[in-house]
Image (cartoon, rainbow, N blue to C red):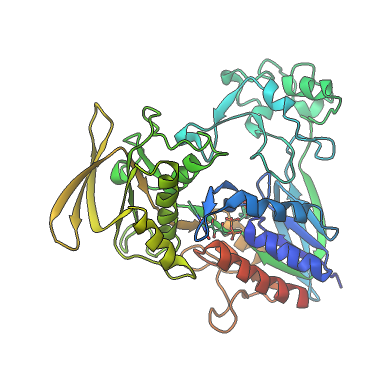
Amino acid sequence: MSDAILIIGGGIAGINAALNAGDYGCKVYLIDDTASIGGMMARLDKTFPTNDCSICIESPLMYEVDNHPNIEILTNTEVRRVKKENGTFTVRLLKKAKFIDEERCTGCGSCVEACPVSVPDELDGKIGGMRKLIFMPFPQAVPNVSVIDPRCRYGKMRELGACVGGCVVDCSQCRECPIALCVKACKEEGKDAVVLWQADRPMDIEIKSIIVATGIRSAEPDTGLYGYNIYGNVITYIQFERLMNAGGPTAGEIIRPSDKKHAQKIAWIQCAGRGLTKGLPYCSKVCCMVATKQTIITKEHDASTETLVFYNDLKAYGKGFWGFYQKAIENGVRYIRARPYDVSEDPKTKNLTIRYEDLDTAEIEEVEVELLVLSTGLVPSERNKRLAKVLKIELDNLGFFKEKDPMLAPLETGVEGIYVCGGATGPIDISESVVQASAASMKAVLK
Ligand SMILES: Cc1cc2nc3c(=O)[nH]c(=O)nc-3n(C[C@H](O)[C@H](O)[C@H](O)COP(=O)(O)OP(=O)(O)OC[C@H]3O[C@@H](n4cnc5c(N)ncnc54)[C@H](O)[C@@H]3O)c2cc1C
């Protein structure tokens, strides 16, 4: 019987589960269907309630996983088929082509410099983040190799001026490319790591247990919610997180999208898009502390910036959370218990007026701000549905993975040998994700 474990999802939960199981002596396959491990935490600025630099604490763990003798990382990789027989799972994985030889690429970046086309970054596009068609997912990515946007490789970026645009030969038929500037730049570095003809690679593994750690996403609000996608200076809390981040598209400058000026008065609307009849019918737990963190960091950037948080019901449930909230108040953050109604924009200044009911005074009030941040909550990975079908386990009515019994058998699923942890179970913060990962990895290794 195999002693190996498969962990699906390489965020902070998957990374911790992999390190625990690997240290225990099991062979671990850690897969992620994006180009790097790291998950959401790799994109955050600092983390509540300590305000540690997020990537500074996650990156050493990513490095440790990468260099662990018992852990094999497979990025750009999906689970395609799972069969269980006599307590062993046979799993078909599909490693999708990055069009890069990961053994040869050293992440030097010369291919990225040579690429002539920039497109809006998936995460940071709204706040001005751009990336090339060949790119590094983020500076500390593991594995630290480039990846090619498949749209470029399949000829869909011709009209944007992709250098392979004029070629009529399918790359899969060709093992030399005299046209692609990234291929040329890589050869000049003596590496020859860009492989435009690379194909997807199926791989079969045998394992004794599976941990699902597919995490969360930041909810995208509907167009029109408090002016989102209509007024340029209404952004989401993940976009604000990226604005604050020194490694983000504005190098940590908190500027408004409309005119790139520093925002001097910023409001947060909590529970944006939440509702029992429409929108998210649950509390995402972390948003009050995320907004609190963001106001404290904003004040660290510039103490004179005014910060207002419109909230309904403050969630400060975790260790150190209440003290963190008190710190924000001491720093001059204003918390207003309110029900915001609507937002309008001054067409000249692009400032936003928020009309709200103050729930303490029952008065209708108005306030003008320069930037508005919507705390929109956490939703499950959109890939959960497909994965649940392949693994033959259930999702709950919200789209998170269903635990066998949340009281007496948490982290277990309807299939013996398949466990869940972190955001795959529901909205969660980092420390809870790590606790769950430790527990799930113990269940998985003892299987
Ligand atoms: C704006 C914002 C700020 C936050 N700030 C804080 C904070 O300051 N402090 C704090 O404690 N928490 C914070 N959080 C919450 C924190 O991000 C989560 O608790 C944490 O990321 C959960 O970790 P995870 O590993 O479970 O999931 P994730 O970080 O989401 O990682 C999941 C991984 O699984 C991969 N994956 C998904 N589906 C598949 C699939 N089908 N196959 C293969 N791979 C898959 C994804 O690509 C991803 O790499 C914040 C969240 C947001 C949105």
Q: Residue at x 60, y 17 (%)?
A: 161
Residue 119, horizontal then vertical, whole percent: 55, 28
Question: Residue 418 vs residue 173: left or right?
Answer: left
Q: Quadrant of the N terminus?
A: bottom right
| Quadrant, the C terminus | bottom right
Q: Residue at x 35, y 65 (%)?
A: 314
Q: Say above or below: 348 vs 227.
A: above
- As drawn, is 2 to the left or to the right of 297? right
* Residue 439 in picture, x, y percent from top left: 66, 74
- Residue 276 vertical placement versus 53 (above, below): below
- What residue appears at the point 82 percent right and 20 percent down from the top-left corner? 188
Left or right of 170, for residue 230: left
Residue nearest the viewer, comparing 70 with 424? 70
Residue 163 % position (x, y): 67, 18
Residue 279: in sight, yes or no?
no
Residue nearer the viewer, 393 or 251:
251
- Residue 145 visible, this angle: yes
The picture quadrant where one finds residue 116 is top right
